[in-house]
Image (cartoon, grey):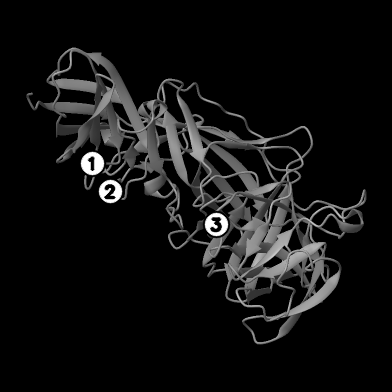
Amino acid sequence: MKKNNIILTLAAVAVAMSGLSCTKSDKNDNLVQEKQTTILTADIPETKVSFQALEGGVFPLKWNNEGERVRAYCRANDAWVPSTTSTGCDVTNEGKTANFSIDLPETDAALRHLYIISPASSGYQILPANRPEDYLDIIRMDSKITPQIPEAASPDERYILMVSKHENLSEYPSSINLDLFLVESFGRMTVKGLNAASVSNIRITFPDRTYINGFLDYKISTDETILTQAGSSTNYIDIDPKNISINSTSFDVFFGIAPTTIAAGENIKFTFTTPTGDLVKEAVIPGGKTLPFSRGSVTGFDVDMTGVGATSTKVLTFDLSTNSAGLETNAWSGRGNKYITFTANDGNPYQFHRGGGCFFNTGTNTHTIYEDTSAGATNGFLGMPALPGYKLVSIDANRSNNTGANVKLEILDSCPKTETTVAMTGTITWAAGNPTPPTITLAGTAVNAMYYIHSLEKTWVPINGLTLTYESE
């Protein structure tokens, strides 16, 4: 096996720009550039690639003279050869081209498939040959860096994730010209009417079924990027705007996001954290429209915060690992309607409602919601406190005491479930082995209203802790 040193010439890509307004009367552009072969996503702290100014409907990318690295992987004989990392680069053509010197992986194979990934620490996990057969076709990337820290006119450099592929090399040449292409999607949110000079965080929350932040699997044979909906995946992103000048006229916020499409009628929630409270606005995608985040493209939309006042937030945490409410400890007797009280982390008692089946499991030290078939009931309910002047906006559960099975549930606005009951979420699955499921975000809730965790499909829902977030109107 011979190690070969070659020069890689990598051209920066141009990122297509498309747009859909989340306000009533703003732009509705749809400038889509034809994309060439796209290979992979990656997350690398060393990258210095950035967006340049919008030009002819695209955002050209620019290499930086310092800190750039790429990593080379070779796939030969249906196996991965260990990667190597470049030692430096020469940036030319006003940042549009970068030449890297790199030692290629060693292999005696007759044909090689060469993958060049930028930035260098990308290729978070190229799944090895000792995994099941289908995993040989997958490259896994970690794109769940949080919070994102964008520049004034560019996304967080760690989210500009690129890969290039050159196939069927019978031998390594002395140099190769390779184009890198993007796998992540991007957003450009133009915020208007926000007079808040010290916004410390921006959270964009997408519909519950939309995971946009987590591990990305790139499937080589079908050129697909799939977000792994594991426990670390979320339906929201947090953005630290410290590099952005925020004023009351308008400013742009770029962010990285896994490819997805938000459908007509679905909500997106925007939360701007300020010293005086959260500024919150929800936008509904208009009928007949979608908000697509396409791989390798930037989607632009506007959020008008004019007249939006500060929202105060109340966060209550409850320890449910002890039977402080004195519930029954037997599943067969722990059923029926019953109001119970738990003390929150603020030291005050709050009223919950047990409808159907819910008991304290002394074996796992959890309050367990379960199916109650008596009197025509259809599964267990646990109603969460209703607070005057506040609406429930998110639920975080801790089930670390009992993670042995998949659990299915939904959030409803009434108990028992009838034809007029409103489902605040679709079916939610807590996967076995996951002690802290993703946050359940709620849209359209009302102040001073109780909402219920409802077990589905006869699953038993064990909980040893709840954190409930409420917001004022």
> Spatial distance from mark 1 to mark 3, Cα to Cα?
41 Å
Q: Answer with mark 1 or mark 3, whichever residue precedes in sequence.
A: 1
Residue shown at the point (59%, 68%) measured from the top left:
363
Judge depth for marks 2 and 3 and give the one in front.
3
Q: Could you say whether the residue bearing mark 1 is in a helix, strand or loop?
A: loop
Quadrant where the C terminus sits is bottom right
N-terminal-most mark, 2 or 1? 2
Question: Quadrant location of residue 162?
Answer: top left
Residue ranking furthest to the left = 2
Specify the amino acid type for callout 2.
Glu
Give x and y (percent) for residue 304.
Answer: 68, 54
- Quick one: SS at disc 2? loop
User: What amino acid is found at the position of numbered circle 3 in the picture?
Assistant: Thr
Image x and y of residue 293, in percent: 57, 36
Q: Residue furthest bottom?
A: 347
Q: Amino acid at mark 1?
A: Arg
Is there any visible trace of residue 234 in the rendered image?
yes
Q: Nearer the viewer, residue 263 or 194?
A: 263
Visible residue check, residue 193: no
Question: In this view of the protein, which residue sits in the foreground, 247 or 204?
Answer: 204
Disc 2 versus disc 1: distance between alpha carbons? 7 Å
Q: Residue at x 86, y 60 (%)?
A: 415
Which one is closest to the eye, mark 1 or mark 3? Answer: 3
Task: Report if the CB atoms under discs 2 and 1 are less than 8 Å apart.
Answer: yes
Quarter in which the N terminus is drawn: top left
Q: Determine whether, in the image, residue 66 is placed left or right of residue 226.
A: left
Write down the residue under mark 3.
403
Q: Secondary structure at mark 3?
A: loop
Residue, disc 2: 46
Q: Residue at x 67, y 62 (%)?
A: 394
The label shown at residue 69 is 1
Q: Could you say which is closer to the camera, residue 5 or residue 180? A: 5
